[in-house]
Image (tube, rainbow, N blue to C red):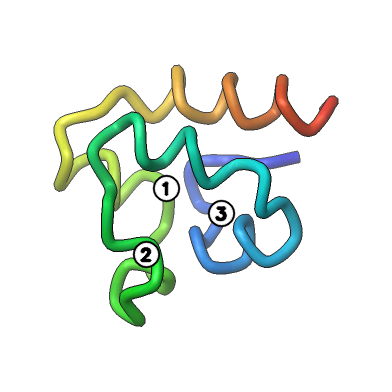
Amino acid sequence: MITKDSIIGDVLDKYPQAAPLFLQMGMHCLGCPASRGESIAEACAVHGADPDKLIASINGLIGE
């Protein structure tokens, strides 16, 4: 299950189909080493996105 503390790079490595959800929140630098090392909570804070909504979308997509 994906949480606010999940690292974006780990999520994308395991669930590449989640990439469009990050792009929709305005995170267009998914290949950047810094962004891949951020937690979902950190990325959402930087991009002004709701982490709970993003996590629910990712978990829904991956079936968890």
The image position of residue 10, as x and y in percent, is 62, 66
Would you say the residues marked 1 and 3 are in contact, meaning their CB atoms lie under 8 Å apart? yes
CA separation, marks 2 and 1?
Answer: 6 Å
Q: Which amino acid type corresponds to the residue marked 2 in the rendered image? A: Glu
Q: Earlier in the sequence, mark 1 or mark 3?
A: 3
Would you say the residues marked 2 and 1 are in contact, meaning their CB atoms lie under 8 Å apart? yes
The image position of residue 49, as x and y in percent, is 25, 28
Picture quarter with the N terminus: top right
Does residue 57 sit above or below 7 in this rendering?
A: above
Q: Residues within 10 Å of mark 2 (few under 14, many from 20)?
A: some
**Regarding mark 2 in the picture, which secondary structure is present there?**
loop
Q: Residue at x 75, y 60 (%)?
A: 14
Would you say the residues marked 2 and 3 are in contact, meaning their CB atoms lie under 8 Å apart? no
Quarter of the image where one finds residue 57: top right
**Regarding mark 3 in the picture, which secondary structure is present there?**
loop
Q: Earlier in the sequence, mark 2 or mark 3?
A: 3
User: Pointer 2: what residue?
Assistant: 38
Q: Residue at x 78, y 33 (%)?
A: 62
Picture quarter with the C terminus: top right
Q: Which amino acid type corresponds to the residue marked 3 in the rendered image? A: Ser
Number of numbered labels in the structure image:
3
User: Pointer 1: what residue?
Assistant: 40
CA separation, marks 1 and 3?
Answer: 6 Å
**Regarding mark 1 in the picture, which secondary structure is present there?**
helix
Q: Which amino acid type corresponds to the residue marked 1 in the rendered image? A: Ile
Does residue 48 sit above or below 8 in this rendering?
A: above
Name the residue nearer the viewer: 51 or 58: 58
Q: Residues within 10 Å of mark 1 (few under 14, many from 20)?
A: many
User: Pointer 3: what residue?
Assistant: 6
The image position of residue 55, as x and y in percent, is 54, 29
